[in-house]
Image (cartoon, rainbow, N blue to C red):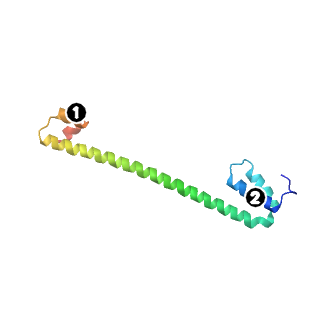
Amino acid sequence: MNQQYNSDNDIITILNYLFIALDFPNVDHIVQQLSEQADKHQEVIVNIAQQLQEKGCQEGLLQDIEQGFEKGIEKGRTEERVLAYQRQLNMARNLLKNGVSLELIVASTDLSREELISLQ
C-alpha cells in the first residue's frame, strides 16, 4: 500500500470495505497504515468501530435467541415425553383396575411388566 497516493475518499472506502469483510488476513496491518494516513478521519474510524460493535452485539443477541429457542424446543419435547409416559401409566392403572391382564397391557402400552407391577 502506497502511503502517498491514497485520497481521503479512498481511505474511507477501504476502511468501510475492510470492516464489512473482516475476514481479510492482514486487516490489522492495513487499518494501522490507513489510520496513520488518515488522522483527520478519526471520526469516521470511530463511527465504523461503533458500527462493528453494534453488529457484534446484534450477532451475539441473535445467537442467544437461537440458543434459547433451541433449549425451549428441547424442554418442550422433554415435557411432552413425560406427559406421554404419565398418560401411559394412567391408562395402564385404569386397565389394571378393570381386570385386564398384565400381558395384554404390556403388549398394548410398551410399559414393562415391572412398571405395571409397581402400579398395583
From this viewpoint, which residue is outermost toward the left? 99
The residue indicated by pointer 1 is 107
Q: Position of residue 92 (x, y in %)?
A: 19, 41
At horizontal 81% and vertical 60% (from top left) the residue drawn is 36
Relative side of 19 to 83, left or right: right
Q: Position of residue 103 (x, y in %)?
A: 18, 32
Residue toward you, 81 or 5:
5
Q: Secondary structure at mark 2?
A: helix
- Classify 10 Å Cα crowding around label 1: few (below 14), some (14-19), many (20 and above): few
Quarter of the image that includes the C terminus: top left
C-alpha span from label 2 to label 1: 72 Å
At horizontal 49% and vertical 55% (from top left) the residue drawn is 65
Above or below residue 9? Residue 83 is above
Q: Secondary structure at mark 1?
A: helix
| Residue 14 visible | yes
Task: Give the amino acid at mark 2.
Answer: Thr
At horizontal 13% and vertical 42% (from top left) the residue drawn is 97
The dot on residue 13 is 2
Quarter of the image for residue 51 reads bottom right
Quarter of the image for residue 31 reads bottom right
| Residue 113 visible | no
Relative side of 29 to 119, left or right: right
Image label count: 2
Residue toward you, 58 or 10:
10
- Classify 10 Å Cα crowding around label 2: few (below 14), some (14-19), many (20 and above): few
Mark closest to the chain's N terminus, 2 or 1: 2
Task: Give the amino acid at mark 1.
Answer: Ala
Task: Give the number of the mark in front: 2 or 1.
Answer: 2
